[in-house]
Image: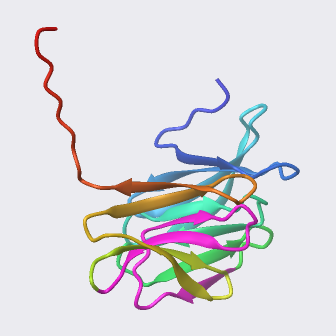
Amino acid sequence: MVLQMPSMSNIQCAQSPSKLCLFNTLEGSTLHLFSFNPEDGTTQEFAVIPGKDEPGWNLSPDGSHLVLTLSSHARKVTFMSVDDKSTHQVDLDPWLPHSGDWAADSKSVFMASHSANGAPVILGVEPNGAHRVLLEGDRAIQYWWVIPSPDGRYGALEAVTGENNVWMIENF
């Protein structure tokens, strides 16, 4: 066993050469982030971040920044520098983001949201505030996250369709 702590979740490590690994615990709606050494399990509190709901976060592949969604009702996303823990918010109005996953180059974040007509979208959001729709789906679909391949050429997209298949097997 490397690490054990009550209520531990969302374990993420940056890519080499960075050695940064983080995980969180949630106390009410307050997010407690801890850094840890995966070799010996030693931990150190990294940041305490108050939120309104269940705040979410994601570590950039290069280990330089975090993206934070602090409320499921806010049209903003927060970027945090790992070095000095400074933060700044990016206004995404009219979009209401509910998850954020860094692109492989650590220069932008894929964020799931919905258009005004209820269609799911994936936004590309840069820390400077620039954002655009990268993908729009059918209203019967829900997008949750996009995980890029290490080379940034592909992405795994979770899309919940609500479709089901039923098979009947006779005489088995």
Q: Position of residue 102 (x, y in %)?
A: 64, 64
On the image, the x and y values in percent for residue 50 come to 49, 70
Please state which of residues 56 and 41 is positioned toward the viewer in this rendering.
56
Quadrant assignment, res 115: bottom left
Residue 54, image x, y percentages: 40, 62
Q: Is residue 140 left or right of residue 79?
A: left
Residue farthest toward the right in the current orientation of the protein:
17
Residue 14 coordinates in the image, percent (x, y): 74, 52
User: In the depicted view, which residue is nearer to us: 67 or 43?
Assistant: 67
Render colour scheme: rainbow
Relative to 34, does residue 138 appear above or below in the rendering? below
Q: Is residue 90 above or below residue 142?
A: below
Q: Is residue 84 left or right of residue 4?
A: right
Does the magenta-highlighted stretch encompass residue 89? Answer: yes
State the quadrant of the C terminus: top left
Q: Residue at x 78, y 73 (%)?
A: 84
| Residue 81 position by quadrant | bottom right
Judged left or right of residue 156, residue 118 is left
* Rendered-image quadrant of the N terminus: top right
What residue span does the magenta drawing correspond to?
A: 87-116
- Residue located at (29% from left, 55% from top): 161
Rendered position, 26 above or below 81: above
Pick the front one: 66 or 116: 116
Q: Residue at x 17, y 35 (%)?
A: 166
